[in-house]
Amino acid sequence: EQDCFILAVETSCDETSAAVVKNGTEVLSNLIASQIETHRAFGGVVPEVASRKHVESITRMLEEAVREAGIPPESLSAIAVTEGPGLVGALLVGIMAAKSLAFALDKPLIGVHHIAGHIYANHLMEDILYPSMALVVSGGHTELVLMEREGCFKLLGHTRDDAVGEAYDKVARALGFPYPGGPYVDKLAGEAAEAEELPRAWLEPDSYDFSLSGLKSAVLNAVNQHRMRGKDGYQPAIARGFQESVIEVLVEKAVRAVRATGSRQLLLCGGVAANRGLRAALSERCVSEGISLLIPPLAYCTDNAAMIGAAAYLKWKSGEFSSLGLKAEPSLSL
Ligand code: KG4
Ligand code: ZN
């Protein structure tokens, strides 16, 4: 059989990324231009600024990804791109670039769902066992997704308000950290001697949904109380209390979902999968429950094009191509 080389593009939020993935698993290149420094001054991602930054970087990322992969553009098998969900202007930049290349090189175009990409980042390392349960935790998403078989997604539960990463970033901001603050909260929580008492949002007993806004408000209240009392050094305990609350609910619901669906594997993915506390707690719990757990290496947790190439490979195998009329779908569902 002939090898498959997919050139993948990801521009759904604030990273401009291009990668070449061989046979869905081997990353030949994975270039990422991060816009974090640009957006930091605004305390979050500014959509219009993100689009412009993508335009500035996309050509260079594509050129470098192909050069680093060491294969001539003619031998690419397909061009893949994130079609949604994400910021519409940001998505459009990647889509236009991918379409132009597909047209100029006469290669098939493959539109990929951003979350399918996050999930299949796990496939870059190891074969996935089905049925499989994915816990998706990122800046924009918090979901439990059941895959009964390859490429088939069923949404079991999702956040009713803030995404986990979003809550991390807001808590980080209240504690005085720059955007995106998730990693700072993670680090501080790991160093804390004690934990602030904070609520857990279990919702209805049989629900796989999540809710982060109550916890976020409780954190903001606690910060204000400490400030009013002129207390100092309260930040570590709040970071740890917040992290413990988030992790306890995520781990419990994920394990329950695995059990209820007879899943053979749990896949952790998305930017918050980089969280050390979550990785440790989930690993420990899965060992004691005898559940097989996959977590991508850090580089493939946050937004990157290699994961889009991994997900695109499944579509390539089944000949599921997109037309050059592919549109950006800011709220595409799985
Ligand atoms: O997947 P991602 O790169 O972008 C989206 O698709 O949303 O996720 C970014 C999110 C940010 O909210 C960031 O604060 C969070 O992931 N994050 C973390 C950690 N590393 C990144 N949150 C908690 N702990 C971390 N170590
Ligand atoms: Zn993402």
Image (cartoon, rainbow, N blue to C red):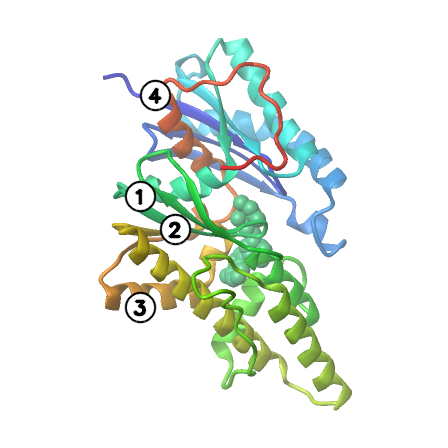
Front-most of residues 40 and 289: 289
| Between marks 1 and 4 in the image, the one whose residue lies nearer the viewer | 4
The crowd level at tag 2 (other Cα within 10 Å; few <14, some 14-19, many 20+) is: some
Quadrant showing the N terminus: top left
User: Residue 297's mark?
Assistant: 2
Q: Which mark is residue 318?
A: 4
Residue 196 drawn at (x, y percent): 56, 83
Q: Earlier in the sequence, mark 4 or mark 2?
A: 2
The CA span between labels 3 and 4 is 37 Å
- The answer to the question of whether label 1 and label 3 lie on touching residues, with beta carbons closer than 8 A, is no
Residue found 46% across the figure and 67% down from its top: 249
User: Nearer the N terminus, badge 2 or badge 1?
Assistant: 1
Q: CA distance from mark 1 to mark 3?
A: 20 Å
User: Mark 1 and mark 2 in contact (Cβ < 8 Å)?
Assistant: yes
- The kind of residue on which mark 2 rests is Pro
Upstream in sequence: badge 1 or badge 3: 1
Judging by the rendered image, the residue that carries numbered circle 1 is: 125
Q: How far is the residue under mark 4 from the one under mark 2?
A: 27 Å
Give amino acid for label 3. Glu
Marks 2/3: CA distance?
17 Å
> Residue 247: where, in percent of width, then height?
46, 67
**Disc 3 marks which residue?**
284
Instruction: Give amino acid for label 4.
Output: Ser
